[in-house]
C-alpha cells in the first residue's frame, strides 16, 4: 500500500474515532450484554432490558452489534423499518417515543440475505454504525454483542469507548458456567467492569399448576457470581411466551407484564440502575 493511501486511511480512521466519541458522549450509560456462548438469551435480555428501562421513563437506545445474526429488529416488530438520515447523521428506528434501535439488519438489502463479512469489513461496518448514527441525548445505550469471546465480539467491543461495563448472560448448565470464566477474561482484556451476571432460563413455572421445575438446574449463576465476587443481577425463568412474543415481534416485558419472567426483568433493571447510577439516582425519573 502506498504511503499516501496509508495516510488517507489513518485520517479517515481518526475522523471516524472522533465522530464516535462525539456521538457517544451524549449517552449517560453504555451497557454491553455478552455471553461466553451462543443461544443463552443475550438478545432477549438486551431487548427486554431496553424496553423495561424505557417503560420506566428512561431515554434508551438499543444497538444490535451482531452482524451475522442480527435479530433485535424482528424481536421488536420493527424489522421492516428503513433508515433515514438527517443533518446530524443516520436516525435510529423508533420502537417507542423514548426507545430507538439500530441494527446491522438494516444494512442488508433484504431480510433473508446473509452477508459474509470478512474481518476488516466487519470492523469497518461497526465503526461506520457507531460514527454515523445520531442518538442524541440518551440515559442508556444497551449494546447486544455477537456470541462468544472470539476476536469478533472482542473487536466489536473495542470499538465502543468508555462503557459502564458488561452484563454477562448465562444459563444454569455447567457448561455455560464454564463460559463465564471466558467472559470475565474477555472483559478484563477490554478493561471493562463487570456489572453483573444474569441467569437466564432458570427454572420453569408451570402455567397450569404454578409448580416450579428446574429443567436446566438453577442457582449456578448466583454461585458463579459469589465465586468471582461480582454482583448477581437476578434469574429469569423459562417462559414459552418469551419465544412466542419474540417471533411475533411483540416486546415480552410489556405484553406479559404480570408474569414471573417480566417481574424478574424489572428486578434486574433495578439492580443495574443501582449499580451503574450509584446509590444516588443522578438521572431525573420521567413519568412511566
Ligand atoms: N427465559 C427464556 N424463556 C424461554 N425462551 C427464551 C428465554 N430466553 C431466551 N429464550 C429464547 O431462546 C432463543 C435464543 O435466545 P436469544 O436469541 O436471545 O439468544 P442469544 O444469546 O442472543 O443467541 P445468539 O448467541 O445466537 O445471539 C430465542 O428463541 C428466545 O426467544
Ligand atoms: Mg443474539
Image (tube, helix red, strand yellow):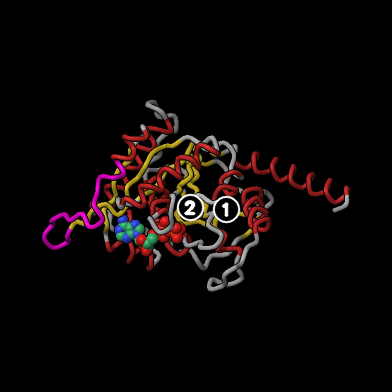
Residue 288 visible: no
In the picture, measured across the screen, residue 180 lies left or right of residue 141, that is: left
Tell me if label 1 and label 2 are in contact, CB under 8 Å. yes
Coordinates of residue 260 in the picture (x, y in percent): 23, 51
Spatial distance from mark 1 to mark 2, Cα to Cα? 8 Å
Q: Main secondary structure of the magenta part?
A: loop
Would you say the beta carbon of the disc 1 residue lies within 8 angstroms of ligand 1? Answer: no
Residue lying farthest top?
Answer: 280
Residue lying farthest left?
Answer: 209
Coordinates of residue 42 in the picture (x, y in percent): 42, 53
Magenta segment: does it hold 282? Answer: no
Q: Quadrant of residue 160?
A: top right
Task: Identify the residue shown where x is 25% and y is 45%.
Answer: 219
In the picture, measured across the screen, residue 213 lies left or right of residue 242, that is: left
Which label is found at residue 152? 1
Magenta segment: does it hold 220? Answer: yes
Out of 266 and 2, give the one closest to the viewer.
Answer: 2
Answer above or below: position of 217 versus 83: above
Out of 60 and 98, give the one closest to the viewer.
Answer: 60
Name the residue that disc number 2 marks: 148
Q: Residues within 10 Å of mark 2 (few under 14, many from 20)?
A: some
Q: Which residues are magenta?
A: 206-222
Q: Quadrant of residue 288?
A: top left
Q: Residues within 10 Å of mark 1 (few under 14, many from 20)?
A: some
Which element carries disc 1, helix, strand or loop?
helix
In the picture, measured across the screen, residue 87 lies left or right of residue 149, that is: right
Coordinates of residue 44 in the picture (x, y in percent): 39, 56
Would you say the beta carbon of the disc 2 residue lies within 8 angstroms of ligand 1? Answer: yes
Task: Identify the residue shown where x is 16% and y is 54%.
Answer: 212
Amino acid at each position: 500500500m502506498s504511503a499516501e493511501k496509508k495516510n488517507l486511511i489513518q485520517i479517515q480512521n481518526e475522523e471516524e474515532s472522533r465522530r464516535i466519541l462525539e456521538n457517544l458522549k451524549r449517552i449517560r450509560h453504555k451497557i454491553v450484554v455478552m455471553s461466553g456462548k451462543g443461544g443463552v438469551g443475550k438478545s432477549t435480555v438486551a431487548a427486554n432490558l431496553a424496553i423495561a428501562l424505557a417503560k420506566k421513563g428512561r431515554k434508551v437506545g438499543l444497538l444490535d452489534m451482531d452482524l451475522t445474526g442480527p435479530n433485535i429488529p424482528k424481536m421488536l416488530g420493527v424489522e421492516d423499518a428503513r433508515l433515514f438520515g438527517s443533518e446530524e447523521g443516520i436516525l435510529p428506528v423508533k420502537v417507542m417515543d423514548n426507545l430507538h434501535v439500530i441494527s446491522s439488519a438494516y444494512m442488508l438489502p433484504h431480510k433473508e440475505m446473509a452477508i459474509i463479512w470478512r474481518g476488516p469489513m466487519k470492523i469497518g461496518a461497526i465503526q461506520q454504525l457507531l460514527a454515523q448514527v445520531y442518538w442524541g441525548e440518551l440515559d442508556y445505550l444497551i449494546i447486544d454483542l455477537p456470541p462468544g469471546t472470539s476476536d469478533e465480539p472482542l473487536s466489536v467491543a473495542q470499538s465502543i469507548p468508555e462503557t459502564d461495563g458488561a452484563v454477562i448472560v448465562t444459563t444454569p448448565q455447567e457448561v455455560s458456567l464454564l463460559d463465564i470464566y471466558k467472559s470475565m477474561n474477555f472483559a478484563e482484556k477490554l478493561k471493562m467492569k463487570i456489572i453483573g451476571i444474569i441467569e437466564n432460563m432458570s427454572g420453569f413455572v408451570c402455567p397450569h399448576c404454578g409448580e416450579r421445575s428446574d429443567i436446566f438446574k438453577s442457582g449456578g449463576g448466583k454461585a458463579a457470581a459469589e465465586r468471582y465476587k461480582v454482583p448477581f443481577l437476578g434469574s429469569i425463568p423459562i417462559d414459552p411466551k418469551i419465544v412466542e412474543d419474540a417471533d411475533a415481534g411483540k416486546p415480552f416485558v410489556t405484553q406479559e407484564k404480570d408474569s414471573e419472567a417480566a417481574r424478574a426483568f424489572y428486578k434486574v433493571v433495578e439492580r443495574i440502575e443501582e449499580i451503574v447510577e450509584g446509590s444516588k439516582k443522578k438521572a431525573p425519573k420521567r413519568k412511566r
